[in-house]
Image (cartoon, rainbow, N blue to C red):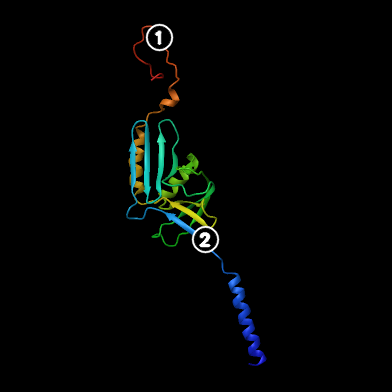
Amino acid sequence: MNAMQTMKSRLKFTLSCATLLFVPLAQAASTSYVADIGNSRWEVEGSVFECSLAQEIPQYGKAFFYHQAGEALTFSLQAMDSEMRAGKALLTSTPPAWRQGLYERDIGYVDVARSKTPVSLDVTNTRLILAELFKGMMPTVTRQAWYSDEDSIRVAVSPVNFKSAYVEYQNCVAELLPVNFDQIERSTVFWRVGQTELDARNK
């Protein structure tokens, strides 16, 4: 073997070793939960006291919109087993698989708690979730797993069948009482002498 061949052999060996040094010892893994197009269903339940709009997320739990009489609309994720680490989770707008050419977009960060209700959003972020669903996008929460620094948990809400269910939900909201019991349980109602019916204000 001449000097040139020896130099080439040493160079190949050096490059091979350098390549091995940059191979990660462990690839980060992501566990995703989402209702696919075949089992994406929204259920509406309600009364004059409260209305809810919920989607079952297979193997995870439920995405849940809730509106109590006299209060603002809220959104939460309810988990069978909370796998997310407490802290800040990334909220993104993710295109479904059938919407080619669109890209995932960051919306912001939301708080995550180590509980069976890991994510509970205020009315502002709840409205953002609604807006993305109306666009046909999947609001997605991504957070590191509590059991591993290398793993992350992604929970997406499917827009399939959402709009028709939302119409039913709005019909429920239209029938809500203006206040709930907690808001008026200590209210005082004054009666005039001889009065037998409540006036409009007290009603």
Q: Residue furthest right?
A: 3
Residue 87 lies, in percent from the top left, at 55, 46
Under mark 1, the amino acid is Arg
Badge 1 is on which residue?
192
Residue 134 lies, in percent from the top left, at 41, 48
Crowding around mark 2 (Cα neighbors within 10 Å: few <14, some 14 to 19, many 20+) is few
Under mark 2, the amino acid is Ala
Q: Secondary structure at mark 1?
A: loop
Q: Left or right: 16 with respect to 58?
A: right
Compute the Cα span from label 1 to label 2: 72 Å
Nearer to us in this view, 166 or 54: 54
Q: Left or right: 132 with respect to 163?
A: right
Q: Which mark is residue 65?
A: none
Badge 2 is on which residue?
28
Quarter of the N terminus within the rendering: bottom right
Mark 1 or mark 2, earlier in chain: 2
Q: Residue at x 41, y 33 (%)?
A: 68
Residue 43 lies, in percent from the top left, at 33, 43
Q: Is residue 100 above or below residue 122?
A: below
The image quarter containing residue 184 is top left
Q: Residue at x 65, y 88 (%)?
A: 6
Q: Is residue 193 above or below residue 147?
A: above
Q: Residue at x 67, y 91 (%)?
A: 3
